[in-house]
Amino acid sequence: MCLMAISNKVLIIRDKPEKSYCILCISYTFITYTFNGTFENRPESGANYSLSMQETSTNITAERKHSHVDICLNRKVCFDRQDRGLDAWIFEHNATPEVNASEIDLTTEFLGRKIGLPLMISSMTGGYRDALELNRTLAETAERFSIPLGIGSMRQALESSSHRDSFSIVRKSAPSIPVYANIGAPEVAAGLSRAELASILDLVEADALIVHLNPAQELFQPEGNTAFKGFLDQLHTITQTISVPVIAKEVGCGISAAVARKLADAGVRAIDIAGAGGISWQKVEEFRYLDRFGKEERFSASALDEFLNWGIPTPECLTGIMSLKEENPEYRKVSVISSGGIRHGLHIAKSIALGADLAASAQELLKALHSGTLEPTLRTWANDLRAAMFLTGSATIEALKKAPINHKP
Ligand SMILES: Cc1cc2nc3c(=O)[nH]c(=O)nc-3n(C[C@H](O)[C@H](O)[C@H](O)COP(=O)(O)O)c2cc1C
C-alpha cells in the first residue's frame, strides 16, 4: 500500500490488515488508516481515538448506533437538492376511476409473504441499551400494520454478547411479520463464517438478510471501513449458502441499473435502492467527525458540498432499474424497494407507479416514533395511498403499478 507524502502532515500507513504502522512525517495534523482501513486527514485532537482495537471497536459500534439516532433526530441531515425527487413526478388524474374508494385493497405480497401495506420500516437500530425500547415499539407497530421490519446493522451482535435483547425483542414483539436481519458490505467483504451468519439470522428468526451498501457513509465516518474489494464474490457465496433470501440495500446514495445488474447476478432476491432524497449519511458522519475533531480537513472545502450531496435521486434509481428489467426479462424476478426520502403515502404510491414493489422509510418514521405519533402517521400514509389509488382508478397495488405518472416539465 502506498501513499504520497504530504508536507506538514503525518502519514500513518497500515499496510497489512494486522498492525504494522509506519510513520512518515510529523506536523499539526495527520493522515491515518484507522484500525479498519479508512483514509483520513484529521486534526491532532483525535489522536488517542483510533487505538486499542478489540475493545474499542465494540464500544465504538454501540456509540455509533446511539449517536446515529440522536443526529438523525436533531440535526439537518437531509440532501439539499429535492428538485429531482419524487415530488417532481405527478400522476395523471383519472376522472372515471371505476372503483369504490372503500373497496381499494392495500395489501400486497413481498418475498412470498402477504403484507398489509406496500411499506416497510427500514433498518435502523439495535446493539445498545436504549435500542431495546425503540425496536420494541417499531416491532409492535409493524406487527399491528402487518408490514415488514428491517433491523439495524447487527455487527454489534457479532462483536459482543451484550445488548442481544435489543435485537431479539423484535421477533418477540412481532411474531407474525417478515423481519429482516442486517449486516454491512464491509463485514461481508471481509468474509462472514456460516456460524456468524447463522447467529444473526437466528437471533431475530429472520425471514431475509439485508446487506447494506454504504461506501459514502464509511468514507465520511470517523472510524469507517472502506475495504469493499471482493464484496460481490462474498455476496454471491452468501446468497448460495443461506436458506433465506438476501436483500441488498443502499442507505441513501442510490443504486444504479448497472449495480442492480451485478447484485442480481450475485443472487440477491430484492434491491432496496435507498436513493438520494432523504438522509445523507455523509452529513450524519460529517457531524460525528466535526463533533470529535472540530474541523474538516480530509476533503477540499470546495468539493465538500458535492460529496455531502452525492448520490442518485430515488426516482432515477427506479426508472433505471425498470429499464434494465424491460431490456432483460431475466431481471424481472428481482423485487424492488423504493426508499430515500419517503415522507408520506403519496410517495409510496408514486414509488409503486415508477416500478417499486414496496416503499420503505426510516427517518420520517423515527421522527414520528420520537414524537409519539408513529401509528397515526402510518394510518395517514395508508389514507394518502388509498387516495392516490382512487384518483388513478387503481383498485389494487398491481393496478397502481400501471397507473400513468409523468415527470413535471
Ligand atoms: C437512525 C438510523 C439508523 C440507521 N441504521 C441503519 C443500519 O444499521 N443499517 C441499514 O441498512 N440502514 C440504516 N439506516 C438507513 C435507513 O435504513 C435508510 O436506508 C436511509 O435512512 C434512507 O431512508 P430515509 O430517507 O427514509 O431515512 C438507518 C437510518 C436511520 C434513520
Image: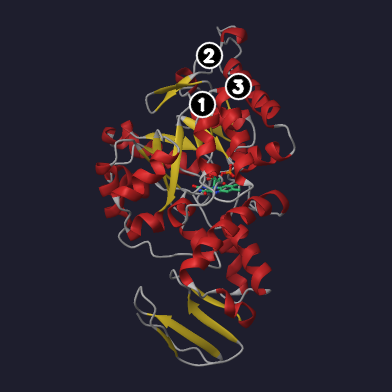
* Rendered image quadrant of residue 137: top right
Q: Is residue 322 left or right of residue 304?
A: left
Percent position of residue 345, x then y: 62, 28
Q: CA distance from mark 3 to mark 2?
A: 12 Å
Q: Is residue 194 left or right of residue 103?
A: left
Q: Residue furthest front?
A: 161
Please determine whether, in this image, residue 189 is positioned above or below residue 92: below
Considering the numbered disc 1 on the image, is that residue within a helix, a strand or a loop? loop
From the image, state whether disc 3 or disc 2 is nearer to you.
Answer: 2
Q: Is mark 2 within 8 Å of ligand 1?
A: no
Q: Nearer the viewer, residue 75 or 90?
A: 75
Numbered label attached to residue 105: 2
Mark closer to the chain start, 3 or 2: 2
From the image, state whether disc 1 or disc 3 is nearer to you.
Answer: 1
Q: Residue at x 30, y 60 (%)?
A: 230
Q: Nearer the viewer, residue 18 or 211?
A: 18
Regarding residue 110, the answer to whether it shows in the image is yes
Assess disc 1: are there few (<14), some (14-19) or many (≥20) residues with their C-alpha within 10 Å of its C-alpha.
Answer: many
Q: CA distance from mark 2 to mark 1?
A: 11 Å
Q: Residue at x 68, y 25 (%)?
A: 380
Q: Which residue is mark 3?
A: 388
Assess disc 2: are there few (<14), some (14-19) or many (≥20) residues with their C-alpha within 10 Å of its C-alpha.
Answer: some
Percent position of residue 328, x then y: 28, 36
Q: Is residue 131 left or right of residue 238?
A: right
Mark closer to the chain start, 1 or 3: 1
Q: Residue furthest right?
A: 371
The three-letter code of the residue at mark 2 reads Asp
Percent position of residue 215, x then y: 46, 59
The three-letter code of the residue at mark 1 reads Pro
Q: Which residue is mark 1?
A: 118
Regarding residue 83, the answer to whether it shows in the image is no
Q: Nearer the viewer, residue 122 or 132?
A: 132
